[in-house]
Amino acid sequence: MTVIPDWFPARLPIYDIQKSYADNAADGPFFNDAIPSRPEKARSVDFLGFSLNSPIGIPAGPLLNSRWIALAAQLGFDLLTYKTIRSLPHPGHPLPNMIFVEPCGNGTARFTDKPLDQFDALTLTNSFGMPSQSREFLLEDIDRALSSLGKGQAMIISIVGTPHLGIDFADDFIRAALIARDAGASLIEANFSCPNVAQSEGMLYLNPGAVYQFANAIVRAIDPIPLILKVGVFPSRELLQKVLKSAAKAGVRAICGINSVSMQVLDSRGRSALGEARPTSGVCGAAIRDAALQWISEAASIIRQEKIDLTLLGCGGLMRPEHLNECLTAGATIAMSATAMMWDPYLALRTHWRNANEK
C-alpha cells in the first residue's frame, strides 16, 4: 500500500499578503522548500486536445508571471493559468489586496486579524483590480512561462477587456487576446466575471446576448486557439442554461467557474475594510466551496441534458485533495485551486499521491 507523504513548506503563504502585488510579482513566489516526486501512477486526462498528466490545475489569480508558472508546474499542477492580462499596462488596487475574513451572511463578510484555526475554513478577500504589464513584457514572459512546462502540462492565458479606452469594449478584449496569441498561447480564457473591477467588466457573464457577442468576436479573432470563459455565480438555473447555450453557439470550448464571490467586506466597526472606494470585493477560499460545487453540478447537468458541447473547469474553495476529487465527481473535467495553493503549494502532489493510493 502506497503511503501518502505529509510534506509542508517552512514558510507560508507563498504569496505574501502584506506586500503589494508588484512586490510579489518582482520577488515571489516565496518558496524555497524541497519539491517531492510524483507517484508513478497517473490520472491522465484529455482537455481540449491536450493530454494532461492529471486533471489538477490553478485558475487565474496566483500565477503572476513565469516564475510562478514554473514553480506551480514543478509542484505537480498540470493546467496552469497565467494571471489575467490587459491590452495596455494597468495599475492594481493599493494595499490591502488580501485580508482574512469570516462570512456573516446576507452578502457580507467581516475582517478578522488572523486565519481561522482550520485550513478547511480559510477565507479571504481577493481585491487586485487585474493589474497588467506592457505588451513587450508579456510577450517575453509568457514565452518563458510556456518554456517552463513539462510533458503533459499546458497553460491558459487569461485575458480581460478594459472599457473607457476610447474604443469598443469588445474590441479591447480582442486586442488583449491577440497579445496572448502572439505570445504563443495555445489556450485563452476570457474573464467575464471579475468582482473587483467596474460592473461593465465584471458582469458580462450574466448577459446571454453580451456573452454571445463578445465571445464570438474573440473566437473569430484567435481561431483555431480554443476559448474558455470564466464565470461567477448565477442567480438562477434558467440564466445559467441560457448563458451556456450562448457560449457554445459563439464557439466557446469550455467554461470555468466560479470566480470569487462579491461581498460587502466590513471591519470591526462596520466600515468598509478596504476603504470607501472598495465597499465590496471578491471573497475566495473555503466559504465559497459549496457555491462552487453547486455551480459545477448544475452546469454539468445542463450540459448533459441539453447536449451542449462545452467542457467544465471547476474552482472555488477547493482546499484539500478530497475537494478537488469532489469537483471532478460533480462533473468538471479539470479541478483547480487558487487560494489553497498559496497556503499549501503541495496540494497537487498530495492529490496525486492520494489518487495513486486509492487505485
Image (cartoon, grey):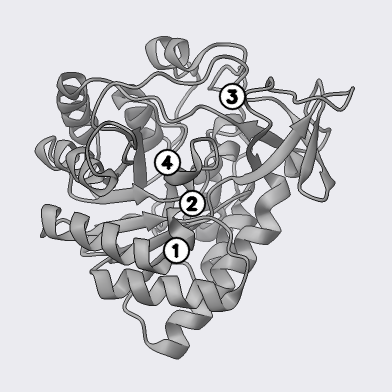
Residue 113 place in picture, x, y as percent: 81, 20
Camera-nearest label, 3 or 4: 4
Front disc: 2 or 3: 2
Tell me the element at label 2: loop
Crowd class of label 2 (few under 14; some 14 to 19; many from 20; radius 10 Å): some
Q: Which residue is mark 4?
A: 60
Residue that carries the numbered disc 3 in the rendered image: 9
Q: Residues within 10 Å of mark 1 (few under 14, many from 20)?
A: some
Q: Position of residue 31 (x, y in %)?
A: 49, 19
Does 102 appear above or below 353? above
Residue 244 horizontal side relative to residue 105, left or right? left
Of residues 188 and 38, the one drawn nearer to the viewer in this rendering? 188
**Marker disc for residue 207:** 1
Residue type highlighted by circle 2: Met
Residue on which disc 2 sits: 203
Separation (CA) of disc 2 from disc 3: 37 Å
Label 1 and label 4: CA atoms lie apart by 22 Å
Which one is nearer the viewer's eye here, 230 or 335? 230
- Could you tell me how far apart the alpha carbons at marks 2 and 1 are, in whole angstroms? 8 Å
Q: Earlier in the sequence, mark 2 or mark 3?
A: 3
Question: Which three-letter amino acid code belongs to the residue tagged 3?
Answer: Pro
Q: Are marks 2 and 1 in contact (CB under 8 Å)?
A: yes
Dot 4 lies on which element? Answer: loop
